[in-house]
Amino acid sequence: MSNLNLNFYDNNLIQPIAEPESTTTPANGADILIEQLYKFYGDVKVLEDLDLNIQAGEFLAIVGRSGCGKSTLLRLIAQLEKASYGEIKFQSARHFREGITNADIRVMFQDPRLLPWKSVLHNVQLGLPKDQQQLAATLLEKVGLKDKANHWPAQLSGGQRQRAALARALSHAPRILLLDEPLGALDALTRLEMQNLIERL
């Protein structure tokens, strides 16, 4: 087994933050089942024989050394990369069959990845139907950026850009939200506020 897999189980470095209240799948969530997952980059083995079961509504933190495969695992769950071997299942369905689509998963990366030629508001509105675009303004208010809606991303601080990226991720009401250390650029108080917002939404 790989070092990452040993970290998951032997050293208990994956720790549930909050257990789901029931075993039924909430309407706004999805179970994730990972079975015998392998990932290679050329001859480099990043993930080996990884098994993991995440229930809908569960908050799970993955902790490990830099380069151990945390971001790779998130990219595999988000279907941004393909596994070398193994399966990732959602709601007991293989990949995105029976109700899970790419639109149901959102990822917040370590960098905000905002489009520099669009305003903050338009970045959050990306992909939203016209009848739901007012939601973007509501979310910007919730993350403390109401007065920055018409600014360009370059006019924001690093922490403000991450908050805008969070609003964009939440605007689509994803069933699965993957966070790749997106709050690292925020100050302690703002980070706590954003964590609470994510839990509420």
Image (spheres, rainbow, N blue to C red):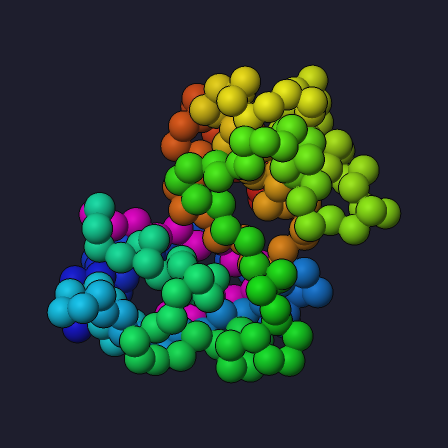
The single residue placed furthest to the right in the displayed view is: 131
- Residue 198 appears anywhere in the view: yes
Q: How many marks?
A: 0
- At 59% from the left edge and 23% from the top edge, which residue is drawn? 152
- Determine the image quadrant of residue 155: top right
- Residue 6 appears anywhere in the view: no
In the rendered view, tell whether residue 102 sits above or below residue 188.
Answer: below
Q: Is residue 93 left or right of residue 140?
A: left
Q: Position of residue 197 (x, y in %)?
A: 61, 37
Pick the front one: 9 or 133: 133
Pick the front one: 125 or 186: 125
Q: Is residue 69 left or right of residue 89?
A: left
Q: Position of residue 73 (x, y in %)?
A: 35, 61
Pick the front one: 194 or 140: 140
The single residue placed furthest to the front in the displayed view is: 117
- Determine the image quadrant of residue 81: bottom left
Q: Position of residue 153 (x, y in %)?
A: 55, 26
In the rendered view, tell whether residue 60 sits above or below residue 84.
Answer: above
- At 49% from the left edge and 19% from the top edge, which residue is drawn? 157
- At 63% from the left edge and 32% from the top edge, which residue is drawn? 118
Q: Position of residue 66 (x, y in %)?
A: 22, 46
- Determine the image quadrant of residue 199: top right
Please provide the residue range marked out in magenta.
Answer: 51-65
Q: Is residue 57 magenta?
A: yes
Q: Is residue 181 magenta?
A: no
Q: Quadrant of the C terminus?
A: top right
Q: Quadrant of the N terminus?
A: bottom left
Pick the front one: 129 or 169: 129
In the rendered view, tell whether residue 114 sits above or below residue 85.
Answer: above
